Image (cartoon, rainbow, N blue to C red):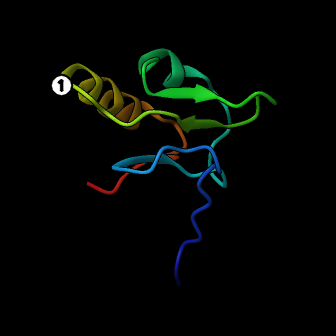
Amino acid sequence: MTEEIDKYPLSAPGKYYIDCNTCLDHESCAETAPNNIRINEEGWVAYVYKQLSNPEEEAQCRQALEECPVFAIRDDG
């Protein structure tokens, strides 16, 4: 069975993304990786608005991915 992934339309293309079908808007990911992850204006889903540009952002996104309680953050890289 194939899992259906729904990326938020404003997501920046690249390595990291967040599955809207899974995200429960804990906001901790946006706090952990503030340079790369935001909560949408409606306040119901997180999305990657900017892909990584340095090792610090890579570490923050990796931490957000590992700490996501619903495994909504994904890494295609």
Given the current orientation, which residue lies at the most extreme bottom position?
Answer: 1
Given the current orientation, which residue lies at the most extreme right position?
Answer: 42
> In the visual, does 30 lie left or right of 21?
left
The crowding category of the residue bearing disc 1, from other C-alpha atoms within 10 Å (few below 14, some 14 to 19, many at least 20), is: few
* Residue beneath disc 1: 55
Residue sitting at x 48%, y 44% = 12
Indicate the position of residue 31 as horizontal and vertical percent values: 50, 15
Residue sitting at x 57%, y 52% = 19
Indicate the position of residue 38 as horizontal and vertical percent values: 58, 26
58 or 53, nearer to the observer: 53
71 or 46, nearer to the observer: 46
Give the SS element for disc 1: helix
Indicate the position of residue 76 as horizontal and vertical percent values: 32, 57
Residue 31 sits above or below residue 29 on the image: above
Indicate the position of residue 26 as horizontal and vertical percent values: 63, 27
Residue sitting at x 26%, y 29% = 53
